[in-house]
Image (tube, rainbow, N blue to C red):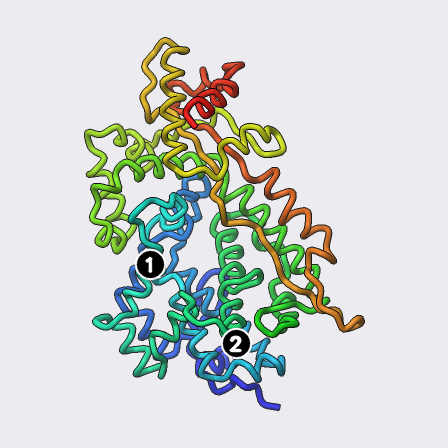
Amino acid sequence: MNHPYVEIPELSNLQSGSGLVRIPYQQDVPFTGRVRALVDTPEFRRLSHITQLGFTALVYPGATHTRFEHALGVYQNALQYLWQLGRDERFAATVDVHTAEVLIAAALLHDLGHWPFCHLIEDMSLEGIPRHEQFAREFLSEGHELPKILREEWGIEPSEVLDILVPSSDTPRMRLVRSILSGPIDIDKMDYLDRDSLHAGVPYGRNYDKKRLIQSLMVNECGDGLAIGSKGKTAAELMVFARYVMFSEVYWHHAVRAASTMFARAFYHLYPRLDLAEYFQLTESDSISVLRKEAQGTDCERLVEGIFSNNRVLYKRVAEFSFYESSEVFELIAHRPVSSLVHWSEQLAARLTQRLNQQVDATDVLIDAPPTHREVEFNVEIYSPREAQYQPLHVVSPVVDTLARKQFDDFVKRVRVFAHPRIATECKTMSDFKSMLIDAVRENG
């Protein structure tokens, strides 16, 4: 039988090899006229001025790729998923051509509302900070180019795209469609693992069989999400391991977290001065300029200049505690609000002033706790045709159960303390630094 989505121009071009644009690594992306129309809007073009990994480039210099490139990769993955899933009778009966086209547009526009250092700022959960989805809603509202292009060239209402990006309906069909963009084995993760690994110059995120995993895609037992066939089990296990190692060695590398914590502390103090509606629509370089200007003459100037000026001075790691190594410290500090981390850091600085017999400024010591989300979860069903049975992957795979649950929570997540290089060595060699930290937290809880 004919493929149900063969008439969709982007899928047709992908199969025929016509009208393609090349992105790393040797990835061909179909550029139809209506795709180019979306990509050429100012709202989409700004993504070419926002890096995907922020401070990761301080450790891995090649990791300067942008959300623009990532968005194209996610869109290309959407086409591959639809081509495979169109062969699944249950999927084709549920997702019509129009809905498939809405998914394609949503995949391309999924990062539309992101601003510079978006996830780092959102993780702070500060009052008055909007979610990035709010800006996606604004960019898809009347008065912008995108709604007109979606209606005239795609035959799509902007509200349909928003319903995938910011759910407003709850039907099995829409849950199934959303799981392709945001789920355990979604097109977003599949791109960023591969792309981040490629640009960082490490193999960790690319050591799984992407083609095999896509070929094993199917609809889950309830019909409202994705599952994988048993032949994709090993590829899925390796994808879990890829995420585990990328978090451990790249995303949460201690030097990356040092810069991230310096930025977070500065932003915490400076954001009340900012025009947030304007700030979050800036390019990355412009947002940095604004932050540097606001920091001048304040206690945050050294933090901001330490990460953004040509004279880089990153704070040093002086202590770290995983749940496995020190459950007492981890449970005391992890998952606490940023206001508590700031307060405890200031109290620790005051204690160090007395202990070291020198002035330790309030911003000389920073406490970093892992965010409450960004987990390596992998709740996906695997289908065994021999038993005609669906089972959660973590049930049939001890690898997934261990890596995605026990190992990640107990070993990868860490509470860290960073200090200005001027006092870092003395802090690191203090035999009672841990007890001093615990006292600073408990007495000011």
Above or below residue 249? Residue 69 is below
- Residue 59 in view here: yes
Q: Residue at x 76, y 73 (%)?
A: 388
Report the quarter where the N terminus lies: bottom right
Taking depth in this image into account, of 31 and 440 the one nearest to the observer is 440
Taking depth in this image into account, of 123 and 64 the one nearest to the observer is 123
Q: Secondary structure at mark 2?
A: helix
Q: Earlier in the sequence, mark 1 or mark 2?
A: 1
Q: Residue at x 50, y 84 (%)?
A: 96
Above or below residue 292? Residue 133 is below
Image spot of residue 425 (x, y percent): 45, 18
Tell me which amino acid carries mark 2: Arg
Image spot of residue 370 (x, y percent): 49, 40
- Residue 215 in view here: no
Report the quarter where the C terminus lies: top left
Tell me which amino acid carries mark 1: Ser
Q: Secondary structure at mark 1?
A: helix
Q: Which residue is mark 2?
A: 173
Mark 2 packing: few (<14 Cα in 10 Å), some, or many (20+)? some
Taking depth in this image into account, of 309 and 356 the one nearest to the observer is 356
Mark 1 packing: few (<14 Cα in 10 Å), some, or many (20+)? some
Give the alpha-carbon distance from disc 1 to disc 2, as whole Å.
33 Å
Q: Which residue is mark 1?
A: 48
Taking depth in this image into account, of 375 and 286 the one nearest to the observer is 375
Q: Which mark is residue 250?
A: none
Image spot of residue 235 (x, y percent): 66, 60
Find residue 407 and report its image quarter: top right
Residue 269 relative to residue 394: left or right: left
